[in-house]
Image: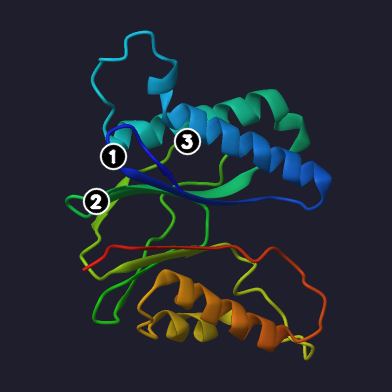
Amino acid sequence: AFMLPEGNLAVVIADVCGKGVGAALFMTLFRSLIRSATIPDHFAREKNRPISSPSKRLLQAILLTNDYVFETHGDTSMFATVFFGILEPATGNFTYINGGNEAPVLVRKNGTLTLLDPTGPVVGAMANAEFSLKEVSIEKGDTLVAFTDGIPDCKSKEDKFFGKERLFPLLQSRDTTTARLLDKIGGQLQEFTGDSEQFDDITLLAVKRQD
């Protein structure tokens, strides 16, 4: 998560294919490309030029990242699932692109859940990929929770998956802070998996718009 020059909040969660050092290096590349392409203002000679809208920032970052990775590293077949959104704190308007990532969950203040489904393919797998933008309103008291597939795919010693049927009720637990919510999920995952070997990454991101 990082702030943009105009005061909006950018939130990103991603999962690169593969494991090990090679995959970690590619994730560093994805991260650097997305962040630098989102804030071209830092590199502009004319500092007083108009600020890009959330939609322009999102599309620019995702399209540039997708095309660069495919054109320069297409032979490696590396790609990443990416969820990238920009929140306008003053209004609660949230514009996002979901490039093949697990659908983040918008937990409304009353406990209802809204899924932010994919709006395009994974990033970096094909040239000239198309991504759609979507918008949703994050009201005061709402919490956005994003995660990678390593959460529902966690396995117990009995070879059972943690699954969304265990995750979603935790999101409705009405914890007052994002920190407590994430700690609760982490504790449940640890209890579920026990001492079994961790199969995949465990990555969570939560953003709450305060009352």
Q: Position of residue 118 (x, y in %)?
A: 44, 55
Type of amino acid at the residue the image marks with label 3 = Ile
Q: Position of residue 75 (x, y in %)?
A: 76, 31
Q: Secondary structure at mark 1?
A: loop
Q: Which residue is mark 2?
A: 89
Q: Are marks 1 and 2 in contact (CB under 8 Å)?
A: yes
**Would you say 119 lies left or right of 52 here?**
right
Q: Quadrant of residue 104?
A: bottom left
The figure's colour scheme reads rainbow
Q: Is residue 172 above or below residue 48?
A: below
Name the foreground residue: 169 vs 42.
Answer: 42
Residue 177, image x and y in percent?
A: 39, 73
Residue 84: give x, y in percent of width and height: 44, 47
Q: Residue at x 59, y 25 (%)?
A: 68
Would residue 8 be found to the left or right of residue 20 on screen?
Answer: left
Q: Which residue is mark 1?
A: 7
Q: Are marks 3 and 2 in contact (CB under 8 Å)?
A: no
Quickly name the residue at label 3: 62
C-alpha distance separating marks 1 and 2: 8 Å
